[in-house]
Image (cartoon, rainbow, N blue to C red):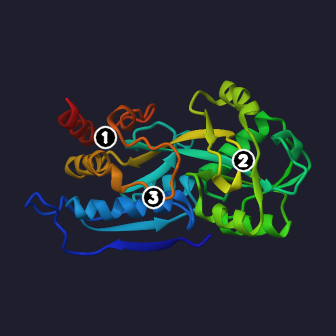
Amino acid sequence: MKRRTLLVAALGLTGCSGRGPAVDRLTIAAGEPGGFYLEFAQLLAGQLVASGVARETQVKSTGGSADNLRLLAKGETDLALSLADAVTAGPGVRAIGRVYENYLQCVVRADSSYKSLRDLGGATISAGAAGSGAALTASRLLVSAKVDATTSHLPLAQAADALASGSIDAMFWSGGVPTATLDKLSKQTPIRLLPLDSSLGALRRTYGAVYQDVRVPTGVYGATAPVSVIGIPNLLLCRPELSADVARGVAKTLSRQAVHLVPPSAVGAQFLNLQSLVVTAPIPLHDGATEEYRRLYG
């Protein structure tokens, strides 16, 4: 997938403190068009300018977590969003905060015969876009559930089109709920989410407690009852070399501007409070973020 760069904030805003910006430009590696990563990153980018953290911000559209981690490792982005299960603890990565819950969703057409994950044996599935955290989690889930399927890795919009046309039987997507692309699809081609909770135990035994049982509420994508899916925390990451001033500013923005960082359509769990923002293990917080959280909350 080609990477697009979206410029979301311009010059000239310095916040209300009277001081100049902590940095001229900040880049944020986000995710696919139509997904929550990109929406959240665009909102954050705007608030970082309004709060005087950066003179301008740039949001990079990517395939998702794996792409973002590569960009961070190469020094080609300042901030990056990633699923917690995609991150390996090491000297080259720090966290600014735990920002929201990602929902791993397995989508089928409403008129299909598939009722459970195990029914997908032999099916044709898009198991998350190449370079996404969804691809990693979906692969782990299929192995844990012992589901042998034919898999491809389509970007979100292509996967939705393929499901609507019947060229694939199911698609995995990891993001907030509702996801705009899937919501649009549900109004044109009725869809269902498959319950995933029956495979959660095996997933946790093999890969750890990062995975949680979360529910997509009634009404999302036309559902008549809640559906249990897999929750994975999402982290906002940086390199240790990010300046302490910038890290403090980003942390302050996350905690103080939380109301402006949630897309209006979102109904999923947000972690933009002290109790959750600091829970980033096994990835340590950047020292600047730690200082800011202590300053704000004692």
Residue nearer the viewer, 128 or 88: 128
Label 2's element?
A: loop
Tell me which amino acid carries mark 3: Pro
Question: In the rendering, at what x and y percent does residue 237 appear?
Answer: 40, 47
CB under 8 Å between callouts 2 and 1? no
Say above or below: 251 vs 29.
above
Q: What whole-number distance in Å separates the C-alpha atoms at marks 3 and 1?
A: 26 Å
Q: Mark 3 points at which residue?
A: 263
Question: In the rendering, at what x and y percent does residue 175 appear?
Answer: 58, 52
Which quarter of the figure is the N terminus placed in?
bottom right
Q: In this view, does 42 lie to the left or right of 32?
A: left
Residue nearer the viewer, 70 or 233: 233
Question: In the rendering, at what x and y percent does residue 247 appear?
Answer: 27, 48
Q: Mark 2 points at which residue?
A: 224
Label 3's element?
A: loop
Choose the circle earlier in sequence order: 2 or 3: 2
- Give the residue at x 24% y 52%: 246
Tell me which amino acid carries mark 2: Thr
- Is residue 158 visible from the viewing direction of this image? yes
Labelled disc at residue 286? 1
Q: How many numbered circles are shown?
A: 3
Tell me which amino acid carries mark 1: His
Q: What whole-number distance in Å separates the C-alpha atoms at marks 2 and 1?
A: 43 Å
Question: In the rendering, at what x and y percent does residue 297 appear?
Answer: 22, 33
Labelled disc at residue 88? none
Say above or below: 252 vs 44.
above
Number of residues whose C-alpha sits closer than 10 Å to that of mark 1, classed few (under 14), some (14–19) or many (20 or more): many
